[in-house]
Amino acid sequence: MNDPSLTVTAVSDREIRITRSFNAPRQLVFDAHTKPELVRRWLFGPPGWVFDVCEIDLRVGGAYRYVWRHPPDTVMGMGGVYREIRAPERVVATEKFDDPWYPGEAVGTLVLTEHGGVTTLNNTIKYESKEARDAVLRSPMESGLKMGYDRLAAMVQSER
C-alpha cells in the first residue's frame, strides 16, 4: 500500500493542498465524505466533542451543515454549498464557519484517484487571501485532520 501519511502543503499564496491515501476503493472514500451516516463515524472532532449536526444535500446548489459541541457551552458550526459533484471522483464546495477563525469563505476541491485498491485524496482549498491561508496554516488544523483521517482509514478498512 502507498504511504497513507497526511501532508498539508501551501501550493499558492491563497491555497493549501491536503493529501492522504486510504487502503480502500474510491467509491467508499467518496461515500465517507458525502453520506451523513458515514461522515458521522469519522468527522466527530477531538475527544470530548459531540458531533450534533451532520446534514448533507448532495447536489449542485445543495448545502451541507456540520455542528460540533464541547460541553458545557462551546459550539463550532460550519457549512457550505456544493458547486460541482462528479461521483466518485470530485466534489467542489464552499466552506464558511459560523464564528470565522479565518477571514472570508473558502472553496475546497476534493479529488479522489484510485490505483490498485488504494485511493488518494487531494483536497485543494482556496482562501480569500494570503492572510486567511496563513491563519489556517498556523492553526492546529493539521493535527485535527490527522485524527479524523486516521479514523476514516480505520472505518473504510472495516467496511471492506
Image (cartoon, rainbow, N blue to C red):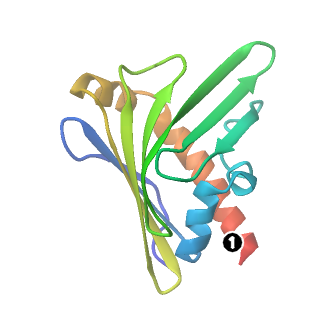
Q: Pick whichever, 82 or 146, lies toward us.
A: 82
Q: Residue furthest bottom?
A: 116
Left-right relation of 76 to 86: right
Q: Secondary structure at mark 1?
A: helix
Which amino acid, mark 1?
Gln
Left-right relation of 9 to 122: left
Q: Residue furthest left?
A: 13
Q: Residue at x 47, y 51 (%)?
A: 60
Compared with 134, 18 (above or below) is below
List x then y, in percent, for residue 151.
Answer: 67, 55
Q: Residue furthest right?
A: 72
Compared with 143, 39 (above or below) is below
| Count of all numbered marks drawn on residues in the image | 1
List x then y, in percent, for residue 138.
Answer: 38, 27
Q: Residues within 10 Å of mark 1 (few under 14, many from 20)?
A: some
Quarter-wise, where is residue 30 in the image? bottom right
List x then y, in percent, for residue 51.
Answer: 74, 36
Q: Pick whichever, 53 or 7, lies toward us.
A: 53
Instruction: Look at the image and tell me in which quarter the C terminus lies.
Output: bottom right
Residue receiving disc 1: 157
Q: Residue at x 26, y 22 (%)?
A: 131
Q: Residue at x 56, y 39 (%)?
A: 144
Q: Residue at x 73, y 48 (%)?
A: 40
List x then y, in percent, for residue 95.
Answer: 45, 35
Q: Pick whichever, 88 or 41, lies toward us.
A: 88
